[in-house]
Structure formats: structure tokens, C-alpha cells
Amino acid sequence: MDFDTTQPIYKQIMEEFKKKMIRGELKTGDKILSQREYAQHATINPNTVQRAYREMENIQLVETLRGQGTFVSVSEKMLDDIKKEMAKKVLNTFIFEMKSLGFSSDEICKMITGQVKEGNDND
Amino acid sequence: MDFDTTQPIYKQIMEEFKKKMIRGELKTGDKILSQREYAQHATINPNTVQRAYREMENIQLVETLRGQGTFVSVSEKMLDDIKKEMAKKVLNTFIFEMKSLGFSSDEICKMITGQVKEGNDND
Amino acid sequence: MDFDTTQPIYKQIMEEFKKKMIRGELKTGDKILSQREYAQHATINPNTVQRAYREMENIQLVETLRGQGTFVSVSEKMLDDIKKEMAKKVLNTFIFEMKSLGFSSDEICKMITGQVKEGNDND
Amino acid sequence: MDFDTTQPIYKQIMEEFKKKMIRGELKTGDKILSQREYAQHATINPNTVQRAYREMENIQLVETLRGQGTFVSVSEKMLDDIKKEMAKKVLNTFIFEMKSLGFSSDEICKMITGQVKEGNDND
DNA sequence: GTGGTCTAGACCACA
DNA sequence: GTGGTCTAGACCACA
């Protein structure tokens, strides 16, 4: 795990978990690393991990059972919402960057269509 | 100016200048900050700035006159190439991220078309 | 290895490698000294060596594999260009010096013809 | 005045004076800088200058009149010899360098003829 | 003032 | 081990 300086680390931790859930690498019921373990393996402050875990708990991504650990607890609907939310963010960033490079909406549409069709049709 | 940890600082400096050239904020003939000035205002080491400036000189983005300063010297063709290169990078990042969120090419195409049409038709 | 004060050290390093490539002492694929080794054997700073190596990489004289070392990667065409470029420089220096000794073009021509024929016909 | 590290400085001083004599910038009877003045203006050690002057005296390029200074005292024949000697050195260096770049005698002859005729016919 | 070169040395990333 | 980046700072060259 590496972290940027562009965003608070706790948010980056949350993003990381969200992505794993979306990709199905983490499913409801799975146990995740303890806060202490996570902090150690990522060499970051335990308080930072705690904040990430707490916020994930608040939005019901995970559940903590005292004495047992933290477990994924995400609903299908929640997962879908997260997916849309993250997609939207990615999309907006993309459009913003393309426009700041001077591309018009039409040009962006053409490029994306071309590029996606071309070399990335292997999904 | 501040810098990520995702990329070397000297490359980020180069990106910054490339973007300004693409947007027309910097044109051939314009004097850019002296190495010392840039270093001071960005609070980085002058050697780092020099590396960025030197690499920009190597690819003929700028021209350096000793004792006088550094000047933009980018050709139309070069500018177009940079624009395409940067667009390609942004595009690939975008597609990569969308796919890692589990979207198929078709879905990406639809989203981008919808989104671009929708709220961003003001260019 | 020792270095003049007439030219930057990093350029002299580049010249040295160019010559070796031209003479066939270094061929594409050969590993050259690591930056640290070179610096040590020449008793110069590793950063200076790195600059030379990097500039050679920029013009595709060598290729660098991180963690493995630096390797000659010069094309036939490149080699030929370098040879011509270096010859031109040597030639111009020669003519300049001869003229500053007061010799005319004709005199230079005669001398060179004589001298080359005379004692150096052993190639 | 700048000096190399390729040769003892006193020899470089001598070369400098020889060249000036050959070009006619210094003629028999001209007073040259005192050793002290020379050392000061070139920021080198007076002993070094002294050695150069003494050697020039030995081969009768200059003459020192006690209390008056040092004066050029070169004969026509001497001048001619020096000119030939220096030319020969330049020539040999040139041929050596061209051969070490892999050029044959014939190629050198052709290049020199071409180059001299071409852009340098203005003497 | 401007950029150019070099040293010394820290720390990181890849293998 | 390899190269890559960055800082700190000296000193030089051009104007």
C-alpha cells in the first residue's frame, strides 16, 4: 500500500476497501485486518486506521464485533451506490482533465469510443 | 504549487508547463520564471527545477539563454503532439479505473456520452 | 581516466563512450560500469556519472534497467551519425588551428596529403 | 587566459606566445608583460611564469634586459621553424584522432579537401 | 542578475 | 547489489 499526499490517508484507505468490495475481492462476512495489523503492515499511525474503520462503520460498509474483529457488511444496494458514486467521480475527473487540455465534448466522445473499442475490448 | 508523491517533482513541473502551453497560457517567446525564482516560490531545491528545465530544453519545449533566462520555444507540431500524448494518458487512466470498478466497454461508452452531453455542454 | 578543464566532465564521459562504441570496443548489449563503479574508478561524484549516463540514455546510446545496470544500445545509423559528427568536430578544430597558424587552405591541403601518404599509410 | 590540465601551464604560456609571434601580433622588439604582471593578470604562480620566460629565453624567443623588461627577439628562421613545428603537431594530433575514429588515409584526404574548399575559402 | 557544473550525501525503488 | 530523486551548497560563466 502506498498513499498519496493528494488526499487524507484515511480516505485512501476507505477507497481501497471500497474498490475491493466492488471487485468482489471482499464480500460480506469476510474478516478484514485488525486496525493494529493494518497500521503495522502499512506503516501508518493506528489512529489513522481507526478513523477509516470508524467511517466505514458509520456508512455500514463494515461491522465491528467486540473481541472478534471487523467484518465486511455491505448490502447489494450499498455496493451499487458506491460503484456509481466512484464511477461518477472518476468520470468527472476525466472530463475535467480533458477539457483543461482543450478538448470539446464531441472530441472526448469520439476519442473514448475509439479507444475503448480498439485495444480494450477484452472484458 | 505543490507536488504529489506519485511522480518525481521534476516531471510534475514539466507537466505543469506542458498544460500551460496547451491552454495557451504560455506561448513561444514568453519568459518563464528563473530557476531560482521557481525554486523559491515552490520551496523546492534549485537543482530539481534545473532538471525539469533541462529536460524541457532537451525536447525543445523551452530555450535557455545563459545569463538571460529561459524562454518558451514550442512549435505548433510539438504542441499538438504533447496534447495528444497527455490526452492519451488521461484516457488510459480513466479506462483503467472504470474497468477496475467493473464497468464494461459498452457501459463506459454510454456513461461518457450521457455525462458529457448532460451538464458539461458549456464549451 | 582523467578529465580536462576544457569541457564539463559529464561530456567527456560521453565522448569516451562514443569513441569506444565507434572503435567497436563497446557493442550493443554490453554492460557498462555501474554508476557507482565508474564514479569510484574515476574518483568523481556519482551524480556526475549519472548525468552522463542519463544524457546517453536520452539520445539512445545506452539503455538502463533499474536494479540491473546500464547497457549499450546503439543502432548502426546512430553510430554512423556519431562518427560523422565527431569527425566534423575534429576536422573543424584542425582547420581552425592551422589557419590561426597562418596557413592557407591550399597549404593545408598539401600538407595533409603529404603527411597522410608519408608515414601513416599503415591502415 | 585559461589553462588546460592537459599540459604544464608553463608550456601553455609558451604556446600562447609562439602563436602570437606567428600571427604577427608580437614582433621582435616588442616588450611583453613583466613576469609579475603576467602572473597577476593570469592569476597563476610567478614561478610558473618565470619558468616559461626562462625557457623562451633559452631558445631565443625573447631577451631579458635587466631593469628594463623582457622583449621579443625572434629571428625569421626561428619563426618559420616554430610555425612548422606547431603545424606538424597539430597535423599529427588531427591524423591520430581521425584514425582512432576509424577513418582511413584516403577518407581523411577526401574530407579535408572537401571541407577546406567548402565553407572555409575565405582566407 | 542569469544558468551550468560539481560535490556530498540522504533516502527510495527495483531485483 | 542496481539506478532514481532530491536536498544543500560551492563555485564558475555569461551579461
Image (spheres, coloured by chain):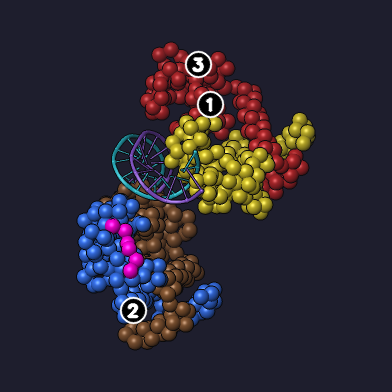
Chain colours: A blue, B brown, C yellow, D red, E purple, F cyan
Chain bearing mark 1: D
Labelled pair 2, 1 in contact (Cβ < 8 Å): no
Q: Which residue is mark 3?
A: D54
Q: Specify the label residue A76 is tagged with.
A: 2
Q: Is residue C116 above or below residue C85?
A: above
Instruction: Classify mark 1: residues with Cα within 10 Å, few (<14), some (14-19) or many (20+).
Output: few
| Amino acid residing under circle 1 | Gln
The residue shown at (44%, 64%) is: B74
Q: Which residue is mark 1?
A: D7
The residue shown at (76%, 30%) is: C119
Q: Main secondary structure of the magenta part?
A: loop
Residue C93, horizontal then vertical, whole percent: 59, 41
Q: Is residue A16 above or below residue F12?
A: below
Q: Is residue A32 magenta?
A: yes
| Amino acid residing under circle 3 | Arg
**Image quarter of residue A95:** bottom left
- Mark toward the viewer: 3 or 2: 2
Do marks 3 and 2 share a subunit? no
Residue D105, horizontal then vertical, whole percent: 75, 39
Chain bearing mark 3: D
Chain bearing mark 2: A
Q: Nearer the viewer, residue D99 or A100?
A: A100
Whether residue A98 can be seen here: yes
* CA gap, disc 3 and disc 2: 98 Å
| Amino acid residing under circle 2 | Glu
